[in-house]
Image (spheres, rainbow, N blue to C red):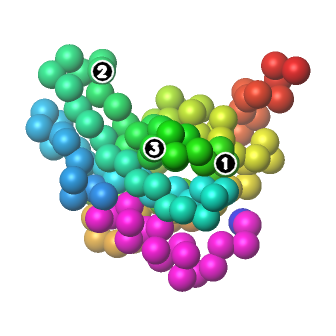
Amino acid sequence: MNDITEELRDRLIAAACEARTRAYAPYSRFTVGAALLADDGRVYTGVNVENASYGLTVCAERNAVGTMAGAGGRRVLALAVCTANGVTPCGACRQVLSEFVDHAGDAPVWIVDGRGNVRDTTMATLLPDSFGPRHLT
């Protein structure tokens, strides 16, 4: 699972859980925070942002990717996601994230619940046999 140190892992987890406190979820009250480590060495965070027109809601993971891309980052090396109950990213987020990880998909992902329990996984496990840029050449 990459060369991510335990200290960096803990930093990503803390950033995701701290970001979660700023989520905008007035309808579902289901807050999500995400933090990713990019190829530029920076940590980018995102929160879910709900909308009264529910279909326009944007997930924390996609907001983090957008922030990274807007700052010039192009590769996700690791990701932490924090929710109350420790659920994994939705399918749309998995697909968007797969665009920014190595096609082997071995980028580590840490799923954290509200009690601080952490589950380790990878992008390849979350989205096996993913479709990506390599299929368009």
Label 2: which residue? 56
User: Distance of mark 3 from mark 2, alpha carbons?
Assistant: 18 Å
Q: Is residue 58 above or below residue 82?
A: above
Quarter holding the C terminus? Answer: top right
Q: Is residue 11 above or below residue 52?
A: below
Label 1: which residue? 75
Q: Residue at x 71, y 39 (%)?
A: 128
User: Distance of mark 1 from mark 2, alpha carbons?
Assistant: 26 Å
Secondary structure, magenta segment, majority class: helix
Residue segment shown in magenta: 2-18
Label 3: which residue? 67
- How many labels, in total? 3
- Mark 3 packing: few (<14 Cα in 10 Å), some, or many (20+)? some
- Which is more toward the observer, 101 or 105? 101
- Give yes or no for residue 9 being in the magenta stretch: yes
Quarter holding the N terminus? Answer: bottom right
Amino acid at the residue labelled 1: Arg
Residue 61, image x and y in percent?
Answer: 45, 44
- Give yes or no for residue 56 being in the magenta stretch: no
